Amino acid sequence: NAGVTQTPKFRVLKTGQSMTLLCAQDMNHEYMYWYRQDPGMGLRLIHYSVGEGTTAKGEVPDGYNVSRLKKQNFLLGLESAAPSQTSVYFCASSYGATGQQYFGPGTRLTVT
Amino acid sequence: GESVGLHLPTLSVQEGDNSIINCAYSNSASDYFIWYKQESGKGPQFIIDIRSNMDKRQGQRVTVLLNKTVKHLSLQIAATQPGDSAVYFCAENPYSGAGSYQLTFGKGTKLSVIP
């Protein structure tokens, strides 16, 4: 049981490039989330999903897109990366709408 | 502004002493609260949670206290160990009536344990 995994662990992009971050969970959770974490700040919700085929915007969705084609996977896309998107990205999943969220190890993204 | 905040950004504690980390919240509709521990370079790890119908909950070496009157949450760690050194986040989950999917996180308190 791997829990929540994220790929890649590190990535450096140039401004304007695109990339996709992959999150996978093997706990059969319905809910999945993408957060970003910046220095001195807590986690801020980018997008979330309440089930396969559904997505919704969180607190800071601009510049990101997501897809949940399979229940176990939640993809975060950056179509045209900007330096302001330099951050550590965490994926999480949960069984229900309230309750513990399980986090992945994070992806450190630098946009130059 | 921040709906969840912490009184102290850093806390230094002697090994073996008890630690208390405080958190204020502003949304009186919040019905679920959770504490996470984040070690350097890792994802947040669940410590303990509490629902609004409780005022205290205990785990292994940790206790969470909830004071709804003053909208205050605290995490107590007994006999603090070097492995407890980390950043601690509180988060709240306001009940929207239609189902709530978002945890709102505070900025975190860094706990340093002095050997």
Image (cartoon, rainbow, N blue to C red):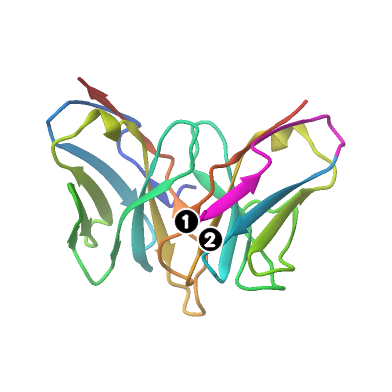
Q: Residue at x 87, y 36 (%)?
A: A16
Q: Residues within 10 Å of mark 2 (few under 14, many from 20)?
A: many
Residue B98 place in picture, x, y as percent: 51, 80
Lateral position of residue B115 relative to residue A21, left or right = left
Residue A44 place in picture, x, y as percent: 56, 48
Q: Which residue is mark 1?
A: A102
Question: Observer-nearest residue: B113 or B20?
Answer: B113
Question: Observer-nearest residue: A53 or B9?
Answer: A53
Q: Which residue is mark 2?
A: A93
Task: Write down the region rendered in magenta.
Answer: A1-17
**Local secondary structure at mark 2:** strand
Whether residue A12 is in magenta: the answer is yes
Three-letter amino acid code at the position of disc 1: Tyr
Q: On screen, A103 above or below B17?
A: below
Q: On screen, A45 above or below A98?
A: above
Q: Earlier in the sequence, mark 2 or mark 1?
A: 2
Three-letter amino acid code at the position of disc 2: Ser
Q: On screen, A68 above or below B2?
A: below
